[in-house]
Image (cartoon, rainbow, N blue to C red):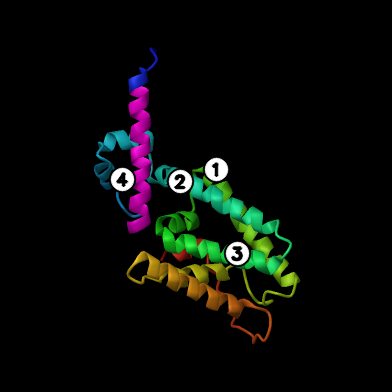
Amino acid sequence: MPKPSPRLRTDAAANRTRILDTARDVFATEGLGVPMSEIARRAGLGVATLYRRFPTKEALVAEAFAEQMGECAGMLDAALADPDPWRAFCRVLTEVCEMQARDRGFSKAFVTAFPHVTEFREMRERAERGFVELVRRAQAAGALRPDFDPADVVLVLLANGGVHAGTSQTTMDASRRLVAYLLQAFRAENTAPLPRPAALPLDAALT
């Protein structure tokens, strides 16, 4: 087989970049439900070109947010290296909620299971394990209320995901205030017993 010409390789790379840039923008503002055909149209390309690069929606979403998923996993690694468990817990919850308020596409991609995209799934599982360990450490240090359950992060994401305050800046301000309120409630001091935690899977935050 003859090798593709440099022009063809350049065009293919440009098309791939255009598809991913368009997908990130669309997913961030409209969520993951936008059809592949609509993404192709907005990218100015044919549907066949899109499917040659990304044969499934799952593959497109995973590739579009691969860098952010890596950053999220790295953020948890950095938090686990922090000698102050409560500070690390607060940092992670604050940054995850800021990511959700800033880019709803990524937040939905993060909590969606991608069984056929191995690398994305592994990074998500690594992030989940890291958060469970952060909770354990903060509770062991006596800083985080003992009845906080890792599944409670889904409640936080559900609440934070409901913050729509007109402009993006107002939404971010409202999200930060909500998280600050919640973090005060999560402190171990002066707590009263809570009802039992809900058995919520991570993808419940998609609703």
Q: Which quadrant of the view contains residue 40?
A: top left
Give the alpha-carbon distance from disc 4 to disc 1, as whole Å.
22 Å
Looking at the picture, how far across and down is residue 63, in whole percent?
A: 45, 43
**Magenta-highlighted residues:** 8-30
Residue bearing the label numbered 3: 91
125 over 3 or under it: above or below: below
Looking at the picture, how far across and down is residue 207, in whole percent?
A: 41, 66
**Tag 4: amino acid:** Met
Residue bearing the label numbered 4: 36
**Tag 3: amino acid:** Arg
Q: Which mark is residue 119?
A: 1
Q: Quadrant of the N terminus?
A: top left
Give the alpha-carbon distance from disc 2 to disc 4, as whole Å.
14 Å
For label 4, the SS is helix
**Tag 2: amino acid:** Ala
**Residue drawn 35% across the image and 32% down it:** 14
